[in-house]
Amino acid sequence: MLTGENDISYGDAFICGNSVKTDWRIACTNVGYCPQFDAVLEEMTGEETLYMFARIRGIPKKDVPEKVCAVIHTTGIGVYAKRQIKGYR
């Protein structure tokens, strides 16, 4: 709900005073990802990880595939993108 991945069925939430229901894009500019241990989940693929970070960053769901494709192309990880991260060694 907070990142826009799930629809809001009831109520509202606020991030830095911004409603995720009515000002979702503004609210998401104040959302980050700060893991305590590993920054990536080894069971996810590189592509899935990019999708996750794009959504956390607040990129609209409809724009994520294009953005992820661009990052994969720019970084040259195309042959690895669908492999689990733990297989990148």
Image (spheres, rainbow, N blue to C red):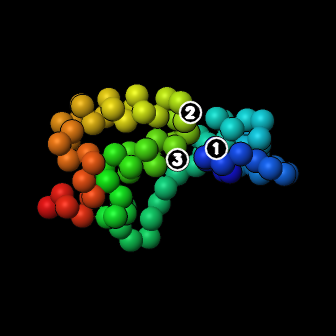
Give the residue drawn at x 58%, y 49%.
31
Horizontally, residue 41 falls left or right of residue 63, namely left
**Between tags 1 and 3, which lies in front?**
1
Mark 3 lies on a secondary structure that is: helix
Circle on res. 56: 3
- Residue drawn 27% across the image and 48% down it: 82
Kind of residue sitting beneath label 1: Gly
Packing grade of label 3 (10 A; few <14, some 14-19, many >=20) is many
The quadrant in which the C terminus is found is: bottom left
Side of 78 relative to 45 (left or right): left
**Is tag 1's residue or tag 3's residue first in the polypeptide sequence?**
1
Q: In the image as oriented, which residue stretches furthest toward the front? A: 82
Amino acid on which the number 2 mark rests in the picture: Pro
Query: Measured from the top left, where is residue 67 in percent x and y?
Result: 40, 31
Secondary structure, mark 1, is loop
Q: Which x, y percent locates residue 45?
A: 32, 54
**Residue farthest along the right direction in this orientation:** 11
Confirm or deny contact between disc 1 and disc 2 (CB under 8 A): yes
Whether pointer 3 and pointer 2 mark residues with C-beta atoms closer than 8 Å, the reply is no
Provide the residue designation for mark 1. Answer: 4
- Residue 82 vertical placement versus 76 (above, below): below
Q: Residue at x 27, y 58 (%)?
A: 84
Q: Are marks 1 and 3 in contact (CB under 8 Å)?
A: no
Residue carrying label 2: 60
Residue 30 lies in quadrant: top right
Three-letter code for the amino acid on which mark 3 is drawn: Ile
What SS does tag 2 mark? loop
Alpha carbon separation for disc pair 1 and 2: 8 Å
Whether 65 is drawn above or below 55: the answer is above
* In this view, the mark in front (3 or 2): 2
